[in-house]
Amino acid sequence: MKTKNLEKIRVLLEKFYEGETDRNEEELLKSFFLSANAPADMESDRQLFLALHEESSLEVPDGEGFEELFFDALEDIEKKEQKSARTIYLRFAAIAASFLLIAGSYFLIVHEYGIEKNGLSYQEYSPEDPEKAYKEAKNALLLVSSVMNKGTEELQTLSKFEEARNEMAKISKFHDAVVMIGK
C-alpha cells in the first residue's frame, strides 16, 4: 500500500479516536479495514472496525416489537435485582443463625456443664502456680472430652448397623450366585 494512503489512514484514525471524524471519513476507515490487509501495527484497529461492522449489521426491531423486547429486558433485570436482594437476606439470616448457634452453645456449656458446677470459677481463676494451671487445664480438657464422647456413643450404634448391612450384602451376593447356578 502506498505510504501516502497509509499516512492518511493513520491521520483519520487519530481523528476517529478523538471523535472528530465525519460519517464519510468513518466509512473510508471502515472500507479500508474491511478490504485491505492492515499493517501489523494496525491489527487492533482492524479488529475494532470488523466488530463495528458486525454490530452495525444487526437489525433492531421497530415499533411495538422493540418496545416489547425492551420491557422484557427491563423485567429480567428487575427479577435479577430481586434475586440478589433475596440472596443478601438469606446470607444475613445464615450468619445470624450461626451467631445464635454459637452463643447458645456457649451458654449451654457454661450453665449446663459449666465450670461453676465443677468447683471452678473462671472469673476468679488466676493461677500463680504452673502446676496448678496444668491440672486445671487438664481437668477442663477432660470435661470437654467427656462431653464429646457422649455425642459419639450414638455413632458406635451406627457402626453396628453398617456391619450388619455388610453381612446382608454378602448373603445377598451368595443368594444371587445360588440362583444363577440353579438356572
Image (spheres, rainbow, N blue to C red):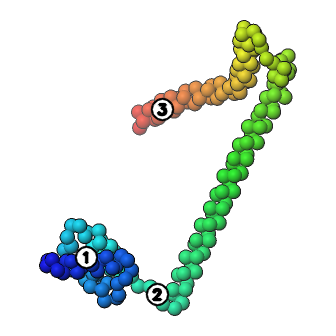
- Which quadrant of the rendered structure holds the N terminus? bottom left
Where residue 10 is drawn, which disc sits there? Answer: 1
Q: Is residue 157 visible?
A: no
Q: Residue at x 13, y 79 (%)?
A: 2
Q: In the image, 122: left or right of 22?
A: right
The residue mark sitting in front, 2 or 3, is 2
Q: In the image, 42: left or right of 175?
A: left
The residue mark sitting in front, 2 or 1, is 1
Tag 2: amino acid: Pro
Q: Residue at x 72, y 8 (%)?
A: 131
Q: Residues within 10 Å of mark 3 (few under 14, many from 20)?
A: few
Q: Residue at x 29, y 68 (%)?
A: 44
Q: Are marks 2 and 1 in contact (CB under 8 Å)?
A: no
Q: Residues within 10 Å of mark 2 (few under 14, many from 20)?
A: few
Q: In the image, 139: left or right of 40?
A: right
**Residue 50 percent location from the top left of the image:** 30, 75
- Which quadrant of the rendered structure holds the C terminus? top left
